[in-house]
Amino acid sequence: MSVRAIVGAQWGDEGKGRIVDYLAQKAEVVIRYQGGDNAGHTVINDKGKFALHMIPSGIFNPATTCLVGAGTVVNFDTMEQELASIAKAGVTGENLFIDWRAHLILPFHCLLDGAEEASKKSGWAVGTTKRGVGPCYADKAARVGIRAADILDPERLKVRLEMLLPQKNEQLRHYNLPEVTVEELMNKCATWRDKFGSKIIDTLPILRDAVKGGKEVLLEGQLGIMRDLDWGIYPYTTSSNPTAGGACSGAGLSPRYIDSIVGVVKAYSTSVGGGPFPTELEDEVGEKLRSIGGEFGATTGRPRRCGWFDGVAAAFSCWINGFTSIAITKLDVLDEFETIKICVAYELDGEITTNLPDTAGQERVRPIYEEMEGWMESTKEARTWEELPPKAQAYVKRLEELTGAPIGFVSVGPEREQIIIMEE
Ligand code: GDP
């Protein structure tokens, strides 16, 4: 198995970072295929604890080439900060490259992100992190965006900015925000060119050679399927496609070259931002999940909404992504729950369904729960399936059944070795 996609199977924050960090120890190439610096991966390894936003989680292995793919949007200011934070741990980032097709998040994108979000009617906020990701993707789709390659060609950049800025300044004026000039953005891009110019490359040959050479390649997604622009809880979605399908277009390879697709699922559910979240627990049980699980955003520190595992969403996710296996994370967080519930169906307008309704329907559903007895002992030390308590095994097996893909990994703690490998 050489090419593997790692996909968030829920609402994001499933623990993809730790799974990629683990798998990247053997990978020759890791490529981030979509999104920007609006979500964080937390990685804990022998070098320390890191919150990565844009840099692929393979960065800690100097032998791994880390690519920021064509499907991403890049803010070079935050990338610089991120590189500085890992440099403190002796990680040089020499193995990092950015595809020249990636779009650039410019300072006005962040301003517009905040203003657009603030202008929404009550209850309709998406819950964006105001990192400019949505406005940048909007410019990309409108074919007025600035790509990484453009900063390598100042003449071209100037023309592109001259075409883009009149409409952007109109939007900025609309929100009473300061206007921008071509000159200031040219200067900004010049500083980025000085720092990152040599890292802006065509990543395709690297990926193609690795795939053709049978090397170990990881495709790293950000966020989760329920925030996918097409298949998620629109409009409370991100502006790109975290799905396995998105991995192909964002990284630059055909679906036929993907050998395995690992869906990362948390043993319960969390969501950050707006939109329906059927199994949400707004009580002391939700509070307990949040405090034991440390469920606070890696990028923003926002408390995450917490709830029981949602088997309807997981089965939907499995179909859309075609998981060849699942990685269940944070099983240890459930160690102290006497009873654990699992959502196995929804009741929608008096009907029981296991099909995921559209956003408005998801807002109305009532989760149908099955209850399982908790194991009430630590799983943190388990390194093999046999070392898990039988009740924990039964719980994991039920998640496997509901999701519809075999278990590949069970993670029982944030440390690199706190993982049970089932697939090899
Ligand atoms: P990502 O964006 O999908 O990588 O997820 P986050 O990094 O936002 O959230 C995962 C958090 O859970 C991080 O703080 C991890 O260190 C932590 N974590 C990952 N796996 C486990 C696990 O199995 N158990 C526990 N207790 N924490 C974990």
Image (cartoon, helix red, strand yellow):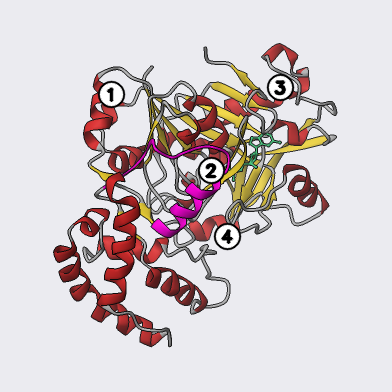
Which kind of residue does numbered mark 2 sit on?
Ile
**Of labels 2 and 4, the one closer to you:** 2
Where is mark 3, residue-wise? Answer: 394
**Element under label 2?**
helix
Q: CA distance from mark 3 to mark 1?
A: 38 Å
The image's mark for residue 148 is none
Q: Residues within 10 Å of mark 3 (few under 14, many from 20)?
A: some
**Can you tell which quarter of the image residue 260 is in?**
top left
Disc 1 to disc 4: CB gap under 8 Å: no
Report the mark closest to the observer, 3 or 2. 2
Does the residue at mark 2 contact the one at mark 4 (Cβ under 8 Å)?
no
Give the magenta-colored segment's residue range: 76-99
Q: CA distance from mark 2 to mark 4?
A: 28 Å
Residue located beneath label 1 in the image: 211
Give the CA distance from mark 3 to mark 2. Answer: 39 Å
Which tag, 2 or 4, sits closer to the chain's start? 2
* Residue 75 in sight in this render: no
Local secondary structure at mark 3: helix
Residue at 37% over, 66% down: 135
Mark 4 → mark 3, Cα distance in angstroms: 32 Å
**C-alpha gap between disc 1 and disc 4:** 36 Å
Badge 3 vs badge 2, beta-carbon distance below 8 Å: no
The spot of residue 129 in percent (x, y) is: 52, 62
Quadrant assignment, res 387: top right
Mark 3 vs mark 1: in front: 1
Q: Is residue 104 visible?
A: yes
The answer to whether residue 371 is above or below residue 378 is below
